[in-house]
Image (spheres, rainbow, N blue to C red):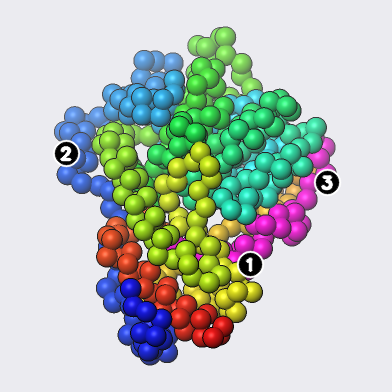
Amino acid sequence: MKNIDELRAQTLAEAGGQPVIQTPFQRYNSLGKEEQVAVQQVMESGVLSQFLGCWHEDFYGGSKVREFEADCCEFFGVKHAITVNSWTSGLIAAVGALDIEPGDEVIVSPWTMCASATAILQWNAIPVFADIDPLTFNIDPASVRANITEKTKAIMAVDIFGQSADMDALRAIADEFDLKIISDTAQAPGAFYKGKPASTLADIGGYSLNYHKHIHTGEGGVIVTNDDALAERMRLIRNHAEAVLPDREAMPINNMLGYNFRLGEIECAIGIEQLKKLPALVASRQHLAERLADGLRDLVGLTVPTVAEGNSHVYYMFPLLVDTTQTGCSKHELARALKAEGVELATVYQNLHLLPMYQQKIAYGHHGFPWTAEFARQSVSYDKGICPVAEEMNDTSYLGFGMCTFSLSDDDVDLIIEAFHKVWAHKVASRSA
């Protein structure tokens, strides 16, 4: 690493100097020969899907679906794994399986992909947004507690960026108020919470298999649970539930609006091979993230990721916080300079409660349903200010590097570190000198 005088002697790329990173990083690709062979075998079999939407032995899918689900059960240490065609589908099935009634409330983080909240609206239930923890970015248990009403039925804990939410605290709240917990662990497969796989401590959890995650099948998801009844309800919702219920007389019929959420044989064949690679891919990402953190942690006004006690972090994202009172310049100014040096950062994440849907309370039709329905609590607020930590971070302090975007080497990480130090030498150290 060059010293500060050497870095200051270089002209910033945004001012016409030579960028630190001159060759774009290679795109992350976890697929290899194993997946090609697996796909070819499925193609040669001629069976690309074996689901039937009626009560039949094929109601649960073909051989690759069942094999992948069995592998996921063993890998994550759960009784049931249910594959779906997207994690959005998995969330919809999870909420529906919990006996949610129209107008019930589910507490969720505003810092998540929009599907976490719209999966709640799919069942005419109401998302209520709780603030996030300022260090882990996960849902804050204290804010969850403050948002509980007589309508609250569940908590959706999003394991954002790659580490688990505080499940002990959330479970204590859930037990006190007789609530269920869904873990949205889309970004954290392979992470652990106190020795157990993230997502497996909830009533229902699951993972995304979307193309930009640690492992993927193109699109897809896996729901996990240890509850027999919930598992069967989610399998029914996945596959045309209403058509099957006449042959399942003991099953309750509430929320049994079925979908086609089925994952095919090709995707599951890929998933079988991808799951085998997950531990090594996670270990590689952790090594690179720790190297990056070590290289950045001494920069003035910059906070590197915090890993909560008892957690492991798989670094889907590498989140950073900028203290503008110390840097003397905004996160946007720093991000522009870093982009010119070859390091592109996200300057915002999400504040779902500020999206037009929630600001105007319009989902189904033009008249505010389900918020205006007589079964809904009319005082649910999505005003700016209800999640001050999340809002401040989005507005002022958050920067994020997509660790799952690139296949990085140690040398690549060293270049990223050099780019940060170069920008800091010009933008930050020069102002405090």
Residue 322 part of the magenta segment: no
- Position in image of residue 63 (x %, y %): 28, 24
The residue carrying mark 1 is: 395
- SS label for mark 2: helix
Q: Disc 2 or 1, which lies upstream in sequence?
A: 2
Q: Residues within 10 Å of mark 2 (few under 14, many from 20)?
A: some
Looking at the image, the residue that sits furthest to the top is 250
Q: Nearer the viewer, residue 169 or 225?
A: 169
Q: Which mark is residue 37?
A: 2
Q: Amino acid at mark 1?
A: Asp
Q: Is residue 74 above or below residue 429?
A: above
The magenta-colored residue range is: 374-401
User: Which residue occupies 43% across, 60% down?
Assistant: 293
Which dot, 2 or 1, sits closer to the camera?
1
How far apart, in angstroms, are the residues tagged by discs 2 and 1?
47 Å
- Position in image of residue 33 (x %, y %): 17, 44
Please state if 176 lies on the left or on the right of 290 as rendered: right
How far apart, in angstroms, are the residues tagged by discs 3 and 2?
56 Å
How far apart, in angstroms, are the residues tagged by discs 3 and 1?
26 Å
Q: Amino acid at mark 3?
A: Ser
- SS label for mark 1: helix
- Asked where in the image residue 276 lies, by quadrant, the reply is top left
Please state if 275 lies on the left or on the right of 376 as rendered: left
- Asked where in the image residue 405 lies, by quadrant, the reply is bottom left
Q: Disc 3 or 2, which lies upstream in sequence?
A: 2
Q: Amino acid at mark 2?
A: Val
Residue 387 part of the magenta segment: yes
Q: Residues within 10 Å of mark 1 (few under 14, many from 20)?
A: some
The residue carrying mark 3 is: 379
Q: Nearer the viewer, residue 234 or 353?
A: 353
The image quadrant where one finds the N terminus is bottom left
User: Which residue occupies 49% across, 60% down?
Assistant: 304
